[in-house]
Image (cartoon, rainbow, N blue to C red):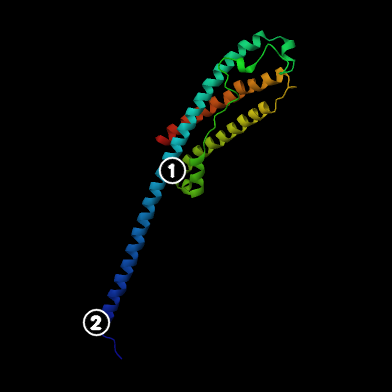
Amino acid sequence: MTISTKTIVKYLLEIVIVAFGVFLGVYFSDLNEIQSTKEEKEKSLTLILEELEYNQKLLEEQIDYHEKLKIQMDSVNNVLTDEDRFSSLADNKDFNHNNIKGWNGFQFARLRAVAFESAKISGILKEFDIQSIQKISSVYVYQESYLSFGKAILDKAIATNSSTKLVDFLGIIELMNSDLLNLEKHLSENLKKVIEDLKS
């Protein structure tokens, strides 16, 4: 049985057409995947930026609160005697934290990390360049440290009871108005820088 040249050419053409069709299918599938990844990356970056800007706003509000409270506490500390300081919080008649002007309790900014965690879980974060990943990750780690410290101060405040000495209670307020405030200021500066870098 002989196969004619015409038949061979026909089969070769069919093979070339099928191979070319497969190549085009893979090529356009890759293009769609690249475009989809690009869109997902841009969407994630936008959400992360919005989240960081929101966190920046929350920090600024807390910085303002803690700075004002610090001024109020300086004037309160000036009028307290040593006897007042070492009396129990419940027995002290000269000090009531609820009477401090502007007092809104032990506060810290409840910073968000939903967009960042979503980008990590989805795997889209690996599509960012290494410098951006480092900047984004480091600012979120810093936020986590801030939140842990804020929670530790709140836990100390919640643990106060009738036998707590006024000096210990004032120490907790001092932690909020000094160490936590300094942490807020540094974190705020870092956030500003990362936001500017990601936008450029």
What is the residue that sits farthest to the bottom in this orientation? 1
User: Residue 130 at what x, y percent from top left?
Assistant: 48, 43
Q: Is residue 8 above or below residue 73?
A: below
Q: Could you tell me if the residues under marks 1 and 2 are in contact, i.e. CB atoms within 8 Å?
A: no
User: Residue 172 at what x, y percent from top left?
Assistant: 66, 23
Q: How many numbered marks, from 0 up?
A: 2
Q: Is residue 72 above or below residue 60?
A: above
Residue that badge 1 annotates:
44
User: Residue 126 at what x, y percent from top left?
Assistant: 48, 47
Secondary structure category for the residue under label 1: helix
Secondary structure category for the residue under label 2: helix
Residue that badge 2 annotates:
6
Q: Is residue 15 above or below residue 190?
A: below
User: Residue 184 at what x, y percent from top left?
Assistant: 55, 26
Q: Is residue 189 above or below residue 15?
A: above
Quarter of the image holding residue 97? top right
Q: Is residue 140 left or right of residue 96?
A: left
What amino acid type should be assigned to the residue bearing mark 1? Ser
What amino acid type should be assigned to the residue bearing mark 2? Lys
Q: CA distance from mark 1 to mark 2?
A: 56 Å
Q: Is residue 113 left or right of residue 26?
A: right
Q: Work out whether residue 56 or residue 25 is closer to the camera in this orientation and state it.
A: 56
| 10 Å crowding of disc 1: few (<14), some (14-19), many (20+) | many
Q: Quadrant of the N terminus?
A: bottom left
**In the rendered structure, which disc, 1 or 2, sits on the residue that comes first in sequence?**
2
Instruction: Tell us which disc is closer to us: 1 or 2.
Output: 1
What is the residue that sits farthest to the left in this orientation? 6
